[in-house]
Image (tube, helix red, strand yellow):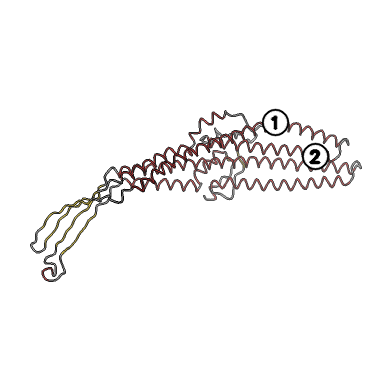
Amino acid sequence: MSPADEPNGILSLGDVFARILLYNPTLAAYSQEIRAQEALALQSSLLPNPELEATVEDFGGSGATRGFDTAETTIQINQLIQLAGKRNKQSKLAGLDTELVQWDYQSRRLDLFAEAAKAYVEVLAAQEQFNLAGELNTLAQEVKNTVQERVSAGKESPPEALKAEVSLSASRVELENVRRRLDISRTRLAGFWGSIHPDFLGLKGNIYDIRPHGSYEDFAARIAQNPDLARWTAEQNQRQAALALEKARTAPDITVSAGTKYYSEPGDTAFIVGVAIPLPLFDRNQGNISAARARLEKSRHLARESEMSARTGLAQAYTSMLSAYDLAVNLRDTIIPAARQSFAAAREGYQQGKFGYLDLLDAQRTLFQVRQQYLDILLLYHQSHTDIERLAGGTLDLDTTTIHEDKQEIE
């Protein structure tokens, strides 16, 4: 991707998905593999080429066979004829190989979409954390000014002003750290479309938008749509086709020959025909048949293991999402408002001389800690929901994600 293709506006999650489809090298590699498998499927449907065979006998010897006077020249065409429907079985197997690669492409595409959706939310959270750190820095400056005024008025001792200065410096350091984390999260997101220098201005979406979702049973009912599970039906069909092909190979193929023979001395010509049939006395393909049968059984076990893993992951993600939702609602509706009131009361009380500076600092720290915790929980909520959509075979588009643009403020 050239620098001119780097987006420089406000990106939506749909924009990110579109760029992944266009520029992600992993998906490009899968696309080439699909093309390769389609080419192999074409190759498997072709008839074997005939062979042209020419032989010259009875020449260059001694006596009557000296020179070419008594030479016999044979020209014939040999054609392998596959029996027991081997070519059709090979073509079917190659087609199922292609289908498997297509399923793997779908799985990888959803993996990338899920990972990108999580990175997208991380950027949204980092943007809010940067705003929060900016608020903290502004507030620390205001508190320092208030403390300085009280020190100048003789209402506070000079060491209190030094504490306020230290608090302000700490807030500046935190602001810079958060800015760097935001840069890292932006770079990680851009990496999904092959960029290392993100130039986009920001992201659409509101990380504060949370809402109850369907029951576990609703999501579990959709789990069959997960390509990680759907692919196993194709793989078992592929394994069965491979077993059928190996069984067909026990039937020996025949080679038919037809040609002419020219006798130099009398100058006569004769026709020849022939048939060659392998005798399956020792190699009856029994090893390959046993291996194909074992691989078919192996795919059945792996299919069951994959379904169990998906259902276990879905249950864990659903529990995590519900827990995050409950805690986020409690923080939004109860804990954060209480922390705001506590800080406002401590600030007013400090200005009136009723509370000390440490009381004010403690209330300030508590308020920003719970707001930071709220952002962390929101991030967990959205990422858990993304995991659920991935495991339930969701499309992970804007209709199934929980990121929305109409912003809900925290009061």
Residue 362 is labelled as 2
Q: Position of residue 368 (x, y in %)?
A: 74, 39
Q: Which residue is mark 1?
A: 330
Amino acid residing under circle 2: Asp
Note whether residue 136 is visible. yes
In front here: 76 or 284?
A: 284
Image-quadrant location for residue 324: top right
Identify which residue is drawn at 76% across, 42% down.
138
Q: Secondary structure at mark 1?
A: helix
Q: Position of residue 2 (x, y in %)?
A: 52, 50
| Residue 220 sits above or below residue 105 on the image | above
Note whether residue 90 is visible. no
Q: Is residue 371 left or right of residue 89?
A: right
Q: Is residue 263 left or right of residue 178?
A: left
Q: Position of residue 43 (x, y in %)?
A: 33, 48
Pointer 1 local density, CA inside 10 Å: few below 14, some 14–19, many at least 20: few
